[in-house]
């Protein structure tokens, strides 16, 4: 008598089908995570692009009022050090 009967083709197919469903579910979860991360990165890059555009416009138009304000940058950023001092 054989204690470990050979699995039938149907049993093999059922087991493999279950494995494939599990792999598909895992892949879908990973893809959803990557798509969420990509959306976060696109949002960050959009904000950076906007900031770049604003700063380039300020530099291009040479806002004299900002230069006249001295060493204090707008929005409470770190102060520039004067070359004279």
Image (spheres, grey):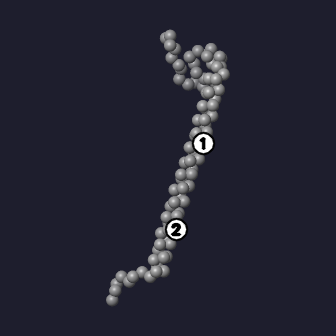
The tag earlier along the polypeptide, 1 or 2, is: 2
Contact (Cβ within 8 Å) of mark 1 with mark 2: no
Q: Which residue is mark 1?
A: 43
Cα–Cα gap, marks 1 and 2:
33 Å
Give the secondary structure at mark 1: helix
Residue, x 50% and y 66% (percent of image)?
22
Whether residue 21 is situated above or below residue 52 in the rendered picture:
below
Name the spot of residue 78 as percent of width and height, x first. Answer: 53, 23
Whether residue 50 is situated above or below residue 29 in the rendered picture:
above
Q: Which disc number belongs to residue 24?
A: none
Name the spot of residue 8 as percent of width and height, x first. Answer: 44, 82
Q: Looking at the picture, tell me which residue is in the foreground, 81 or 75.
A: 81
Give the secondary structure at mark 2: helix
Name the spot of residue 1 as percent of width and height, x first. Answer: 33, 89
Q: Which residue is mark 2?
A: 21
Can you tell which quarter of the image residue 75 is in?
top right
Residue, x 64% and y 20% (percent of image)?
62
């Amino acid at each position: 008598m054989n204690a470990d009967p050979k699995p039938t083709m149907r049993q093999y197919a059922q087991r493999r089908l279950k494995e494939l469903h599990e792999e598909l579910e895992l892949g879908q979860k990973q893809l959803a995570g990557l798509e969420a991360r990509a959306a976060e990165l696109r949002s960050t890059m959009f904000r950076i692009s906007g900031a770049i555009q604003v700063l380039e416009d300020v530099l291009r138009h040479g806002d004299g009022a900002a230069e006249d304000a001295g060493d204090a940058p707008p929005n409470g950023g770190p102060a520039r050090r004067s070359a004279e001092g």
